[in-house]
Amino acid sequence: MAPAVAESEIVYNILNSEFVKYDYDRWIRYFRHNSGQRLRIDFSGETELSSEQRKRIFPSITAFQKGERSEGGYFLSAAERFAEEKKEPSYTEAVRYFIKEENTHSAYLAQYMKWHRVPEKKYSVLDSIFRRLRQVNGIRSEVTVLVTAEIIALSYYTALKNATKSSALKSICSQMLHDELPHVVFQSYTLAHFHNTAWTGFQRRALMMAACLAVWTAYRSVFRSGGYSLRRFLQNSLLLLHRSDVIARKTGW
């Protein structure tokens, strides 16, 4: 089964979208507009999932729902310092809109879980690791880890969309894919404000490889059901990472 959104299409959309031309003022306008286009999940045709389907998808859904849910206190503090240092006063407000959008994603997944009587997860090992890594070195590590997670999310939500016949879940995944693609560009633009070297590129690649392997080990049943092999997952993620790096370097800060 081939993923609904081909890797080549995702890459094309990233490199040829208007998003690559945005500054933070335009990102604020985008996030503000997008907040008015929220998904209303239709459960009218939803049916109970089989025990096999529930076992396959909900461990990952609960973990991703936990990951999307954050008040972003550390991120906002780091964003304020970055905005002052780089003379980008609009950045903090853009980050607030970004966090709000991530929390909306968490709410979508929470609605789906509630309908299927699945409780929210209080703790996730992977989420805990990602959060600690984000706080290693201020805004740069925060954004580097975030863009890694968002690239992985593009493959995950594509696979999840194909993993069941649930129309409600498919609509949620489509909304996630619509929103996560600009997030990759948004974070890449911020990374362009730093000096990028071969060493930082190696670090980003190593982080991506490790993150992909961890996510695959935990949730490979969803990826396989959605048409992904480990090789395809890695290739797709590394290709998107390369495009993220292209965007960062092209901006030339």
Image (tube, rainbow, N blue to C red):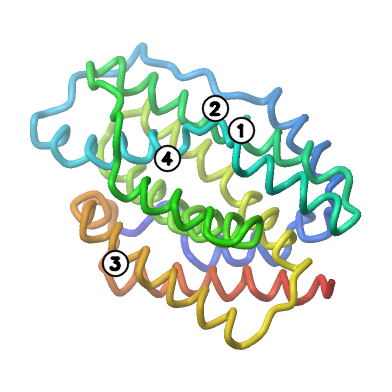
Task: Judge depth for marks 2 and 4 and give the one in front.
Answer: 4
* Residue receiving disc 4: 67
Mark pair 4, 3: CA separation? 17 Å
- Above-or-below relation of 144 to 206: above
Residue lying farthest to the top in this orientation: 44
| Residues at circles 3 and 2 in contact by the CB criterion of under 8 Å | no
* Residue receiving disc 3: 213
Residue sitting at 46 percent across and 58 percent down?
133
User: x, y percentage for residue 168?
Assistant: 38, 25
Say left or right for 106 vs 94.
Answer: left
Mark pair 4, 1: CA separation? 13 Å
Q: SS class of the residue under badge 2?
A: helix
Which of disc 3 and disc 4 is earlier in sequence? Answer: 4
The numbered mark at residue 101 is 1
Mark pair 2, 1: CA separation? 5 Å
Q: Quadrant of residue 33?
A: top right
Q: Amino acid at mark 2?
A: Thr
Mark pair 1, 3: CA separation? 27 Å
| Residues at circles 2 and 1 in contact by the CB criterion of under 8 Å | yes
User: x, y percentage for residue 50?
Assistant: 11, 28
Mark pair 3, 2: CA separation? 27 Å
* Residue receiving disc 2: 104
